[in-house]
Structures are given as C-alpha cells and as structure tokens.
Image (cartoon, grey):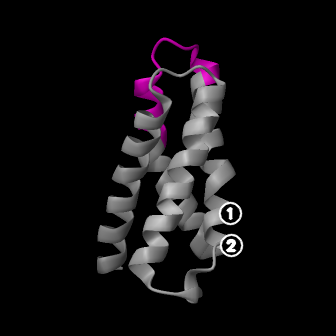
Amino acid sequence: MSDWLIAFFFTLLIEVPIWLCWMREKSLRLRWFVAIGASTITHPCLWFLFPWESGDYLTLLITAETAVFLVEGVWALAFKVKRPFLLSFCANAVSCTAGLIGSAFF
C-alpha cells in the first residue's frame, strides 16, 4: 500500500499542475476537483486491478495508459474542459515518462 501511495502522490505532483494550468477559464475550486478527481478515479484501478503479470510489459503499459487517457478524457469532457483528450494525453504522457525515468533510478 505504501508503494501505491508514493506512486499516487508522485502522479498528483506531476499531473495536477498540468490540469490546473490548462483549465484557467474554470473556477479554482472546480479546477482542483477535476484535476485531483482524474487521478483518483484511474490510479487505484491501474495499480490494483490491472493484470500487470499477464503478458508483455510494454504491451500492458500501452494498454493501461490508453485506458487511463480515455477515462480521464471523458472525465474532463463531462466538465466541459477545452480539448479534454489532448489535456489527458499531455498530463499522462508527462507522468508516465517521469514514472518510467524514476523507476529506472529507484
């Protein structure tokens, strides 16, 4: 569980500022809700429910990140965020890249 919490907070640290900056036209309270909500919905599912041991890691990573990108894009769309899928793609690309780099060193 502690590994998940570290990974979750690392994800929030990277993705939330991207979401907050992207949604400048929204109220601050809504921006925080949408930004934190996106990872709160997807991260536990990805960490605890996704079958990471079931196949090739690269294939699973691409599948998992695609699912997260789509779910978070729909989440942003529900709040009428401009270009929701581009936002989701950017935030997840940055955090996935940072996570891969971090895991190579730790």
Q: Is residue 32 left or right of residue 45?
A: left
Task: Find out whether residue 19 is within the magenta segment.
Answer: yes
Q: Which numbered circle lies on residue 48?
A: 2
Residue under numbered circle 1:
45
Residue positioned 40% across, 35% down in the render: 86
Whether the residues at callouts 1 and 2 have beta carbons within 8 Å, the answer is yes
Q: Nearer the viewer, residue 2 or 103?
A: 103
Q: Nearer the viewer, residue 14 or 60?
A: 60
Instruction: Tell me where residue 96 appears, x and y as whole percent.
Output: 39, 60
Q: Nearer the viewer, residue 85 or 38?
A: 85
Task: Find out whether residue 17 is within the magenta segment.
Answer: yes
Q: Is residue 65 left or right of residue 8?
A: left
* Three-letter code for the amino acid on which mark 1 is drawn: Cys
Q: Which residues are magenta?
A: 16-30
Residue positioned 39% across, 65% down in the render: 99
Q: Residue 75 is drawn in which quadrant? A: top right
